[in-house]
Image (tube, grey):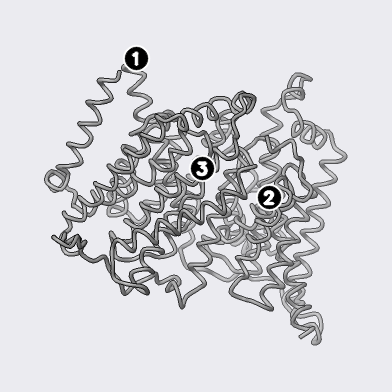
Amino acid sequence: MKAIERYSTALIFVLLGTMPYWMPLVGGYTALGTRVLVMAIAAMAVNFLLGFTGVLSFGHAAYLGLGAYGAGMAIKYLAPSTSLGFLVGILAGTLGAMVIGAMIVRLRGVYFAMVTIAFGQVFYFIAFRWVSLTGGDDGLTGWGRVPLDFGFTQIDIAGNDKAFYYLVLVCLAVSAALMALLLRSPFGHTLLAIRENERRARFLGIPIQQHIWLSFVISAAFTSLAGTLYAYLDNFVDPRAFHWQQSGDFVIMAVLGGMRSFWGPLIGAAIFVVLQDKLSSLTDNWMSLIGVFFVLVVVFFPSGVLGILRRKVQA
Amino acid sequence: MTQVILFNLLNGLIVGAFYALMALGLSLILNLSGVINFAHGGFLALGAYFAYSLMPILGFWGALLIAPVLTAALGLLLERLLIRRLYGRDPLYSLLLTFGLAFIFQDVLRFIWGAQSVPYQIPSVLASPLSTDFFFLTGYRIFMVVVVAVAVAGLFLILGYTRLGMRIRAGTLDLETVSVLGVNVRLLRNLNFGLGIYLAGLAGVLAAGMLGLSPTIGDTLIMPSFVAIIVGGLGSLPGTLAGGLLIGVASGLTTVFFPTATEAVIYVMMALVLLVRPSGLFGDEGRLR
């Protein structure tokens, strides 16, 4: 099993590493590949909480949006620097999660989910209403990602789509490595214990609320990284980044790929983003098709693509 | 100034009554079946459009009576076909399912009735203001509050004094025991779902008269309803009612002093309540586990 895992990780990175070169052959384009990776980072981050801590958050669009607006506003109002955008975006999302997390860790299950949905919507209204700062419904415009400057060399992520794709890929690789490390650490094993049996974990003396809070904040931090990349992708961000629909999309990506597997959300994100792209170019009624897709996944594939594959392998 | 405050206070109460009506339906379903019905806003919009299409045939009063019943019938059907399959599983799945339904509803409404918002005719008796001093008190607003009050009273009478209501209340506390005692729990959950959707449909018809019709009419109302449930208290229907009125008044008053925060204020209230009493104002602390 270990060998299979190592091979499949290698395979995933080979496929992703060459994506800009084979994507046009199957009818895609580089920006679509980049979008898959951005959404994959967010879906994996959501799954850190959902699949490996057993906590249901339906409001992660809040942290995507905070990351996106943080990055956009930093570049627009402070200084045109991509790295500053990363810093501000991730800080905004993480701080937001620290405050909101502290208020909701005492809730469980359905109620936790409901409060996360509701809190997700606060930022939507703020972004929508505070027009002078955020541009309101028209979105935050008049800024753009700038080339990365390392002193000795520059990487032109602004003009070159492929260069930006590889920057996002590096972000994905780093995030995945960090999350995998965390999950293998004693902290990660404690999270699994909480997922499996919270009451027993409590009897063992584990401070449950602190662990859930920390897992929530970590998950939101990676989601806000995805948010900054999301804003850089189009050099634009609007209140829809905060919308509950976006939160639902993350969860369906995780479920579709397989919540109990590390790479599942990546596969889910790939399927979902490509499907959404194709459907919205085919018909105006793509929203109901996405809705039908949600229903089908929940009723027929609740364990996701990787869950089904794994059962086949074990059988 | 007093006039403005009074206006917004009353307006807040009216809007609050509305949130409460919607939140009560959500709360019924949540308490008995553990399902967050995200499609509730979609059902509300559907109720509104049913009324819109029925009005030319049945008139205002007929539409008011029939449209919620049709909406409830669709609710019963969807529960039987889809939602029922997910009881007892992780709440994640039912939530995703109702998310999907919400998308479908919005798109289908747009497909059938168009994306443009359309006005909803109300009888002229209700459209005129009651007096010149209280110009804001149109008959329709008063009428809405009366209908909501009757509906809420009816709901509490059903829950308090009928066999069905007794079973719903018992099932909310311990469904397994109710099942062991020989009650058909599948049917009970089905009817309970229909009851919740009836309230959504009724709220939809009333909303149509005040806000006009658009496919996203339910979207703006569902979040405050969630907040009403959380503020009012987990597992408590009177709490949900109080929560709805409370956030309505709060956002009404905020409109006077700081209009930008009209929406945000209810979330601030939710945050405060969660900090002080995580189970909500009238909540059952046992539901925190």
Q: Nearer the viewer, residue A125 or B111?
A: A125
Q: Percent from the top left, x then y, of residue A163?
A: 17, 55
Relative image position of residue A53 (x, y in whole percent)? 50, 34
Observer able to see residue A288: yes
Provide the residue designation for mark 2: B230
Residue at 55 percent of width and 31 percent of height: B90
Q: Quadrant of residue A158?
A: bottom left
Residue receiving disc 1: A314
Q: Kindly identify the amino acid type of the residue bearing the numbered disc 3.
A: Leu
Q: Tell me, yes or no, whether dots 3 and 2 are on the same chain.
A: no
> Badge 3 sits on which subunit?
A
* Marks 3 & 1, CB-CB < 8 Å contact: no
Q: Residue at x 60, y 65 (%)?
A: B264
Identify the residue position indicated by label 3 in the image.
Answer: A214
Question: Disc 3, disc 2: CB below 8 Å?
Answer: no
How packed mark 1 is, by other alpha carbons closer than 10 Å (few <14, some 14-19, many 20 or more), is few
Residue A133 lies in quadrant: bottom left
- Category of crowding for the residue at label 2, using alpha-carbon neighbours closer than 10 angstroms: few (below 14), some (14–19), many (at least 20): many
Q: In the rendered view of the protein, which quadrant contains the N terminus of chain B?
A: bottom right
The residue type indicated by label 2 comes to: Ile
Distance Cα–Cα, label 2 vs label 1:
44 Å
